[in-house]
Amino acid sequence: MTLSQRDLAEVGVLIACALRPKMRPGADSDYRRLLGRYRADFEFRNAVDSVLDGLDARVLSDSDLGLVLGVRRESVFAFRLSDLPNVTGVTDRLLVGLVSVAITAYAYPTPADFDDDRVRWVSVEEVERFIRDACERLKRTPTDEESLDEAWRCYDRLSPGYKADRGKGKGRRSPASSTYWVASVLGWMVDQGLARPAPARGPEAYQLLERFRIQAGELAGNATYDVLAAIRQDEVTS
Amino acid sequence: MSEPWPVGRAVFDASFSDRVRVLLRTRPVADAADNATRQAWSDQGYDVVALSLTAIDTVIARQGFDHEVTYDEAITGLASLAANTNPTRPHDEHRAVAGYVVDALLNRREREAPFSYSVSAFTREQDGSVRHRRTAVEFRLLTEHEDHGRGVNVLRASTDAINALVGGLEFDVEDEQSAIELMLTRQLQRGAFGQAEKAAERSRLLSVRYADELRTILADTSRDIRTVFNQWAEQVPAQLDRNRVHLEERLAGESRLLDHVRGALDAPDVEPDVAAAAARIAGLLEECRQRHTELHGRLVTARTTFLDEQTRQSFRPVGGLRNPDINDGVFLPLLTMPTKGAIEPAETFSILLAGTQPPKIVRFADLVDDLLAPRREAAPEEPLEPDEELGDPDPPAVPPEVLAAAAAVVDGVELPARLSDLLLAAREASLPAGVDRRHVERLVVLAVLWNYAPETTQDVSTAVDAAAYVLGPTAAVDADGVRITMPGWSGDDLIVAQDEDALARWAERHSAATPRDREAS
C-alpha cells in the first residue's frame, strides 16, 4: 500500500499539530486520531519522520502528550534567541543559555532524575540563588592564572535586585539584574510549552512540564555535551 | 561465640533490617502528626494520621485508571472529611488541614525530596565483635505527575506507600491473593461478613500494587530497553505467563465470589447488617474485577510493547539513550569556560530545549493593522498594589446621632409647618450630649432642601435617604415666596408637610392670608 495524496495531507496536519507545543491530543480529536495512526501505521510513521527529517527536525516522543519534536540548530523551526526581548548582544545570548542550563541542572541534578516523571517546581528566587551559589563557589576556587573572562562572571556581575528607578521601566526589573534574566527565561519557557506558572506555589513559581523533561533529557543535554566535547577536542589538537 | 548476648540474636538476622525499613515507612505520617502541633489549627482535634491514610487510600483508589486523583480533588475530599471533625470551624481551615496532610505526604517542605532516614545496620564479624554501619533509607509516599491526556497534575502513591498501607507484605503477591480469596470464601460460608469485608479491602489494595509492578516494568521497557533486557530474557516472560493465568483465575474467582455474596443478599431471612456488609463487599469485588480486567488488557499488550520498543530503540542513536548529566557535564563546565567559547554551547542548549517555533510570516494587511493600532501598554511585570480605595466604604458624612436628633426635632413639630418653625424647634430642643446644635439645624435645612429640589449633579440616593429619614418617607415640601427671617439663614421659608394632600390643604387655608401675615410680623 502506498500513501495517497490524502494521506500525505494528513502527514502535514499531524506535523502542524506537533509544531504547536500547547496543543494536546486529549483535547483535539483529529490530533488524537493522527497520533494513533503515527503509532500504529508503519508507512505513515515513516512518511512523517521523513518529512520532518527534511525540515531538520525529528520526533523525540510520541506519548499521549503528543508528538514532541526536536530540531537541529539549522532548522527553520529552530528558536532564535534574538527574538527574546532585550536579547541583542552575545552576552545576552550567553545569559539565556546559562540560565536555561541552570534551570535544568537545578531541577534534574543527576542523570537518573530524567527517568523520574514526577513534577518539578522552580521559582525565580530558587534559580537565582542556585546560580549565585555556583558563582560563589567558583569565586573561592583558586585559579592559577587570573582569568576575568570566564562565563560565570557575566552572571556574577549582574545585581540580583536591581530595578530602574526612573523612566518608563520604573519599578520594574531591569535587564541589568540577574532576576530579570531568570524571569525572562522562565517566561519564555511558558510560551514554548515547557513550563507553566504555579501561582499557588508562591510568587514567580513555575512547574516544569513533561515536555521540558523530554527536550532536555532526550536532546538538548546530549547535543550540548557533543558541542562541548568538540570544543575540548579542538583545544587539545590546536 | 557461646557467651550470652545482652540483646537478642534477631538483630543480626537478615530480616531485621527489612523490619526496620517497614517500620520507617510510617515515620512521615507520624512526623506530620507531630508537626501539626505547630499549626494554627493544632488544638482543633483533627486526626492527621487518619487523614493521611485516607489520602493514600483516595489516591490508590483511582491509580492506574484514566482519571487519576488530582491534587485539588484530594484536598477537596480530605477537607470534607475534616469538616466532619469540626463542622463549626471555617471551610478554609478544613482546606488548610487537608493541604497540610497532602503536602506532608508529598514532602513539599523539602521540595518533594524523598523522605530520608538513617538506620543502623549491625553485623557480627568472624571474631565475634559487632560492627555497626549507618545507612540511609530513602523513599517517597506520594508523587505528583503530569497527566499527559488532560495536562493536569495527578497524584500517585509509591510502592512504599501501598506496601506500608497493606501492612508491609513483603511476599509474593499472587500467593497472598490466593490466600485472601480462600479466606473470603470460608468467611462468607461461615457468615463472618465483617472479616470478609476486611479481606476484600486488602484484596483490592493488592491488585493496585500488582498493577504498579507491571507499570514499572513496562515503563522501564519503553524508556530504555537495555536496562531491563536481562529481565525480559529470563524472568519477565515467565512472570507474564504466570500473571496471565493468575489473572484469569482471579477474574473467574472474583465473579464466583460476587455470585456468592449476591446469593447471600438474596437469601430470604438475611440480617440487615449482614446484608449491608455483603452489599459493600459486592461493591469492592466489583471494583477489584474492574481493576483486574484493566490489568489483563495491559498484560496482553505487554509482549507487543517489548517488541515494539525493541524495534524502535534499536534504531535510536546510542547518544540519545543515555541520560545527560546536566550539572557536572554541562552546567559547571560552561560556567568555567571563557565567555567567547561558552556562547556556542549555551545557545545550543537553549535552542534545542525550546523545541519548535514556526517562523512568523508577516502578512501585509496585518502589518498595516498593527502599525495603525494604538500603542499597547506593556503589562506590568509585578502585580500592582491592591487598590485601597476598594476597601471599606467611606464613613457616612452625617453621624447617626445627628440624624436621630434631627428626626426627633421634626417629630416634635406638628406638620405642616414652616422651615423657620422647624429651626426654632431645633434651637430649643434638648439634644443628647455630644451632638452639635448647628449640625442638627444644618441637617434639617438640608433635608428640606433635598426634598424640595434634589441635587441631580451628584449621587442623590444617600441625600434622599437622609431626607426621608428626617422628614418622613412621604413628606412633601413647597415654596410660596415667603422669605425666611431666621438670623443665619436666607432664601424661601419652605413649607414642610407630612404628605402631598396635607400640603395641598395647607396651601388652600393659607393661600391668601398667610403671606401678608408673615410680612406684617
Image (cartoon, helix red, strand yellow):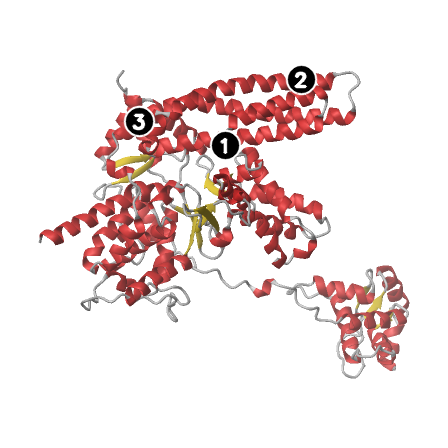
Q: Position of residue A130 (x, y in %)?
A: 37, 59
State left or right for residue B403 relative to residue A213.
right
* Depth check, front residue: B233 or B480: B233
Q: CA distance from mark 1 to mark 2?
A: 28 Å
Residue topped by disc 2: B260
Task: Nearest to the eye among marks 1 and 2: give it.
Answer: 2
Task: Nearest to the eye among marks 2 and 3: give it.
Answer: 2
Assess whether mark 3 and mark 2 are in contact (beta carbons under 8 angstroms).
Answer: no
Q: Amino acid at mark 1?
A: Gly
Secondary structure, mark 3, is: helix
State left or right for residue B343 relative to residue B42.
left
Q: Which quadrant of the structure image shows residue A21?
A: top left
Q: Position of residue B176 (x, y in %)?
A: 55, 27
Q: Position of residue B54 (x, y in %)?
A: 61, 41
Q: Which sits earlier in the primary sequence, circle 1 or circle 2?
A: 1
Residue topped by disc 3: B310
Residue topped by disc 1: B64
Q: Amino acid at mark 2?
A: His
Same chain under badges 1 and 2? The reply is yes
Q: Which sits earlier in the primary sequence, circle 2 or circle 3?
A: 2
* Depth check, front residue: B398 or B173: B173
* Residue shown at 9% from the left, 51% from the top: A237
**Residue, far left:** A238
Q: In the rendered view, would you say B356 is above or below B469?
A: above
Q: Residues within 10 Å of mark 3 (few under 14, many from 20)?
A: some
Secondary structure, mark 1, is: loop
Protein chain holding label 3: B
* Residue shown at 42% from the left, 60% from the top: A125
